[in-house]
Image: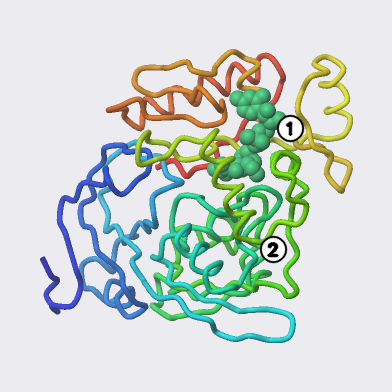
């Protein structure tokens, strides 16, 4: 179906089950496919839709839907990938927000532009990557970020944001922030540009990658080999959302003060922790949840993945409410035992 102006692709009472990697049931009042900045402006200018707050949907890989959305849902499908510039010290590459993340990583590697290999196989789209500053195996999106284009949902104006304007943090950015200057729900990312530094240097410090190096005897892997290792590591411990619904890590790894960390280690010497540059300490949330005995457990049709306690899964037909009930029970038991509050990573709607 198209809108009155005949240019937008519109679906009413659209099921969102296939649009979120958890496979949770929810219905959108109206689903509009966005293929360009101009499409966003058509929504902003629409006599009826322009008055309500739209909901922006990327690949739905970091989302827990607990209810139907009585809103205009914008499904971002902006396509296209290109090399913007090559300088002496970097390749600048651009991709449309609707492009699949992993396919984009694979494409850059095939073109001979390395730098995103540690981020291979992360589910979702290019446009969702900056929202939560995706990260894995020692690299975060912000380390390879150049700039992005977004359209303001109030004015319909296109803007370009650099890294400082995106306010990247650990699994965080201005696009998740509600408060002063926050852009949560206020703009649609349409294109992202990456800065891939030259000469390429592999990031192999992460323990799992060190292990691969030792196992294979390859001391100096190329970028494609690193990507293959990352894919193998991820496949071994993370469920494929195409097979088992999930949203990746369900909680952030909590950061505690040096004193708190010392205290916790005193009580639980086994606890997996990573010292941070500022003296604080990041704790492995998966370890905390595992230590509370949650691995493999279920509440209704929502469960804790057998191979990685940080990942909650849809055992088939789960509702968002069941996922949230399970998450709360986990938070309570981790708080009860360790005095630490776990913060969910996905956006809960
Ligand atoms: N652990 C357990 N039991 C578990 C799970 C983990 O003891 O059930 C221990 C592991 O043995 C390991 C430690 O906890 O020593 C950390 O686990 P892992 O290396 O799997 O990494 P993580 O902290 O669980 C983080 C990111 C992942 C990212 C990996 C690799 C967060 C919230 N998660 O997971 O990101 O892929 O590191 O860099 O920061 C995501 O954000 O969705 C995600 C998958």
Estimate how packed mark 1 is, as few (under 14), some (14 to 19) or many (20 or more) residues with alpha carbons within 10 Å.
many
Q: Contact, CB < 8 Å: mark 2 with mark 1? A: no
Residue 177 to residue 276: above or below: below
Find residue 170 and report its horizontal and vertical position in percent. 67, 50
**What's the residue at 37%, 56% (across, down)?**
57
At horizontal 83% and vertical 35% (from top left) the residue drawn is: 257
Which residue is at the front of the view, 144 or 221?
221
| Residue 187 in the image, given as x and y percentages of width and height | 45, 67
Q: Secondary structure at mark 2?
A: helix
In-image side of 78 versus 225 (left or right): left
Question: By what rule are the colours in the image chosen?
Answer: rainbow
**The N terminus is located in which quarter?**
bottom left
The disc, 2 or 1, on the residue closer to the chain's N-terminal end is 2
Residue 182 rendering spot, x and y as whole percentages? 56, 60
Q: Residue 85: which quarter of the image? A: bottom right
Q: Residue at x 86, y 21 (%)?
A: 263
Residue beneath disc 1: 283
Would residue 178 be seen by someone viewing this image from the given angle? no
Residue 294 position in % (x across, y down): 55, 16
Classify residue 50 as left or right of residue 195.
left
121 relative to 199, above or below? above
Q: Is residue 326 above or below residue 26?
A: above
Helix, strand or loop under label 1? strand
Q: Is residue 274 at least partly visible in the picture?
A: yes
Task: Give the spatial CA distance, label 2 vs label 1.
Answer: 22 Å
Residue bearing the label numbered 2: 143
* Quarter of the figure with the C terminus: top left
């Amino acid at each position: 179906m198209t809108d009155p102006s005949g240019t937008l692709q519109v679906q009413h009472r659209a099921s969102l089950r296939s649009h979120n990697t958890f496979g949770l049931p929810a219905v959108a009042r109206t689903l509009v496919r966005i293929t360009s900045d101009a499409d966003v402006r058509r929504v902003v200018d629409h006599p009826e839709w322009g008055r309500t707050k739209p909901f922006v949907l990327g690949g739905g890989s970091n989302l827990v839907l607990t209810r139907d959305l009585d809103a205009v849902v914008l499904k971002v499908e902006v396509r296209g990938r290109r090399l913007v510039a090559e300088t002496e010290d970097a390749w600048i590459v651009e991709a449309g927000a609707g492009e699949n993340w992993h396919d984009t990583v694979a494409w850059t590697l095939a073109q001979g532009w390395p730098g995103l290999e540690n981020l291979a196989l992360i589910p979702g789209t290019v446009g969702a990557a900056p929202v939560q500053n995706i990260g894995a195996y020692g690299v975060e999106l912000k380390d390879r970020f150049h700039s992005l284009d977004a359209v303001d949902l109030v004015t319909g104006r296109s803007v370009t944001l650099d890294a400082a304007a995106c306010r990247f943090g650990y699994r965080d950015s201005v696009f998740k922030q509600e408060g002063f200057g926050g852009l949560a729900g206020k703009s649609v990312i349409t294109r992202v540009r990456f800065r891939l530094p030259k000469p390429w240097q592999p990031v192999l410090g992460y323990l799992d990658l060190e292990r691969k190096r030792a196992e294979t005897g390859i001391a100096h892997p190329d970028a494609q080999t690193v990507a293959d290792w990352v894919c193998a590591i991820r496949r071994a411990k993370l469920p494929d959302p195409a097979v088992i619904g999930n949203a990746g890590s369900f909680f952030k790894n909590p950061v505690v003060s040096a004193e708190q960390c010392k205290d916790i280690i005193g009580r639980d010497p086994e606890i997996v922790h990573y010292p941070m540059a500022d003296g604080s300490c990041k704790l492995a949330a998966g370890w905390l949840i595992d230590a509370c005995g949650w691995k493999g457990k279920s509440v209704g049709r929502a469960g804790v993945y057998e191979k990685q306690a940080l990942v909650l899964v849809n055992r088939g037909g789960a509702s968002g409410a069941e996922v949230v009930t399970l998450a709360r029970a986990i938070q309570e038991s981790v708080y009860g035992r360790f005095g630490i509050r776990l913060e969910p990573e996905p956006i809960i709607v």
